[in-house]
Image: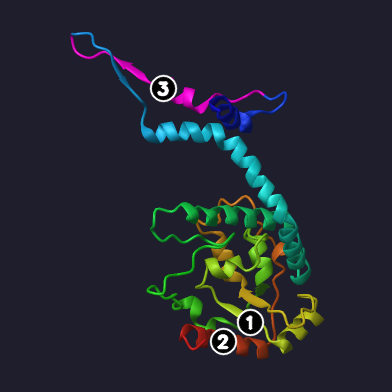
Amino acid sequence: MGAHRSEGRRDWLQQDDVEQPPNPWNVMIKHRQVHRRGRRSQMTMSYTDPVISMDLLRTVLQPSFNEDILGVFRKYMKFFEKAASNVKENVEEDVQTDQLIREACRNCLENAKQLFSDGEKTTVARPGFEPKPKTSEPVKREGPKWDPSRLNETSTFVLGSRANKALGMGGTRGRIYIKHADLFKYAADAQDKHWLAERQHMRATGGKMAYLLIEEDVQDLSLSDDYKDCPDLKMTPVELKPFTVPLWMIEKMQKAMEAQSSGKE
């Protein structure tokens, strides 16, 4: 009976032609320490720190854990692939589906940590997104950048999706709006989108949302500490494709800016 139990415990280590990891119990036993103290020679035995001992065990078991976890992700991968494919079809520009899937998988692992929490409430950020501003700290929409008079017929604008990509966040649509909630964005209406599509500034999106950002604001962001050393930064005219808009659209933007800064929107 005892021998049978012993063999059962070792089943998870049995793999053909694969070097077996050390027995975790032997690993911990070998980490006893011998000390000599003072003038008199005395031998004392002590085990390593409990955290270290447990981490040694984790190290041995980790390969098996990883394989089991991969098995779970393989089971659900078809759902991730389908969702990423739908995102690619619905947005107005190419997205990196592989990156979307990897971020979704990492987020699953992050949220799974809550199963072993110590009782304290934790918040896990969504993939590719920063935590939303605290309700006790309202977003500040004031200063020169929120002065409607700064907008005129010479002002240049960029699509929010292009700005998102140019700042190195192309894999996650809309991340720029979450990370920089204090950034002015204008939601184009049907008339605006028709005008923009006619001039090939964007593809016809039907009922989908399309945001316009002020190019100057995006350029300023690229020079901030958050992005100045980003390897995926591509702040070129070819990437941003800035454009001007007619006065009637400028007037709508000015009203939107005033409403957002005053908290009416």
* Residue, disc 1: 187
Q: Nearer the viewer, mark 3 or mark 2?
A: 3
- Characterize the local packing of mark 3: few (<14), some (14-19) or many (20 or more) Cα atoms within 10 angstroms: some
Q: Are marks 3 and 1 in contact (CB under 8 Å)?
A: no
Q: Nearer the viewer, residue 149 or 228?
A: 228
| Total marks placed | 3
Residue found 24% across the figure and 11% down from its top: 42
Numbered disc 2: secondary structure: helix
Question: Could you give the CA–CA distance between mark 3 and mark 2, rounded to whole angstroms?
Answer: 67 Å
Residue 243: quadrant of the picture: bottom right
- Specify the segment rendered in magenta: 19-39
Residue 6 is situated, as x and y percent measured from the top left of the image, at: 56, 27
Residue 31's tag is 3
Q: Amino acid at mark 1?
A: Ala
For marks 3 and 2 on the same chain, the one whose residue lies earlier in the sequence: 3
Residue 8 located within the stretch drawn in magenta: no
Q: Nearer the viewer, residue 139 or 151?
A: 139
Q: Amino acid at mark 3?
A: His
Residue 256's tag is 2
Q: Nearer the viewer, mark 3 or mark 1?
A: 3
